Amino acid sequence: MKTYLDCFPCIVRQALESARMATNNEILQREILNSVFKELPKVPQTVTPPEIAVTVHRIIKKVSGNKDPYKKVKEKFNKKALQLYSDLKQRINKSDNHLLTAAKLAIAGNIIDFGAGGSNFDLNQNIKEVLSSNLAIDHFNKFKDDILSSSSVLYIGDNAGEIVFDRILIEEIKKYSEADIFFVVRGEPILNDATIEDAKFVGIDKVAKVISDGYDAPAILLSNSSKELKKAFDSADMVIAKGQGNYETLNEVKGNIYFLLKAKCLVLAKDIKSNLGDNILKCNIE
């Protein structure tokens, strides 16, 4: 997905929020914003928003000297989501369709997003709303069929905390399929995106092989990804991509890719042909 003009105010908002996460020094915060303002006019609109985020967050890390501004936030939501684990499993077991409920919960977890969504969200309320509503874009039947027929599944994670919900979906997938499952995390910290450290903390490594994309973008950029990720992507029978960032970088990539996300901004909602706040399970191949 290209960068729209409406993306730039969001990028600036995110830069300020991240600067404040990185340092309490207002002089450095202003220096960060000045540097971001200087770089943004150079950015072509043909690139995706996550590619711009790489530039912005490298500035933040360099100026502040803080290599992982969201470390405490990630730890907090990993722990918070793990506290919900037993309850979420019970919700699945009590439901009429276990796999669909697990997929909906994975989408509900996508609200834990300090990039596109910001920090103003109610996780428990969002879980209730997602489980009680229909998917706005619903390709679940094909999703289930592909799980049953796939021998290799590549699951691209998004945010810390959210990955607990991903673990639960993977556990449910494994009841239907003997496929090899690979779970992708970021190569370096950016925003509250999950890294290998986060994946191990919540136990993803117990249910899937965890691999790094080898890069510091808040989404998969195949041209910059590790050889291991590229090999896994090319050989996977199906790809599950979580969150807005991965939609923004992969929506025009050919392949059997499923996007599981909540539409948290109007720009993306318009691009994916949904409404703001919609819950989406969409396949690239319809």
Image (cartoon, rainbow, N blue to C red):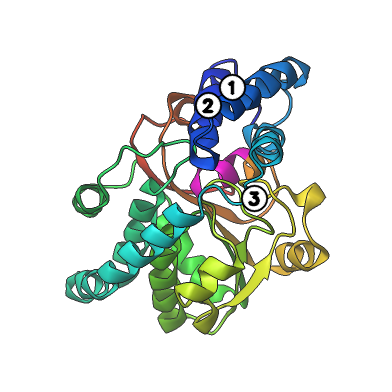
Q: What residue is pinned by disc 3?
A: 67
As helix, strand or loop, the secondary structure at mark 1 comes to: helix
Horizontal relation, residue 10 to residue 64: left or right: left
Q: Quadrant of residue 156?
A: bottom right
As helix, strand or loop, the secondary structure at mark 3 comes to: loop
Q: Which residues are magenta?
A: 243-248
Mark 2 or mark 3, earlier in chain: 2
Q: Are the residues tagged 2 and 1 within 8 Å (C-beta)? A: yes
Gap in Å between the C-alphas at discs 2 and 1?
Answer: 6 Å
Q: Quadrant of residue 15?
A: top right
Assess whether residue 245 is covered by the magenta stretch. Answer: yes
Badge 3, how many Cα within 10 Å: few under 14, some, many 20+? Answer: some
Observer able to see residue 3: no
Name the main secondary structure of what is drawn in magenta.
helix
Mark 3 or mark 1, earlier in chain: 1
Q: Position of residue 181 (x, y in %)?
A: 58, 75
Q: Position of residue 208 (x, y in %)?
A: 56, 78
Badge 2, how many Cα within 10 Å: few under 14, some, many 20+? Answer: few
Q: What residue is pinned by disc 2?
A: 26
Assess whether residue 255 is covered by the magenta stretch. Answer: no
Against 228, residue 63 (above or below) is: above
Quarter of the image for the N terminus: give it: top right
The amino acid sitting under disc 3 is: Lys
The amino acid sitting under disc 2 is: Glu
Q: Position of residue 159 (x, y in %)?
A: 49, 54
Badge 1, how many Cα within 10 Å: few under 14, some, many 20+? Answer: some
Q: What residue is pinned by disc 1?
A: 30
Q: Position of residue 6 (x, y in %)?
A: 53, 17
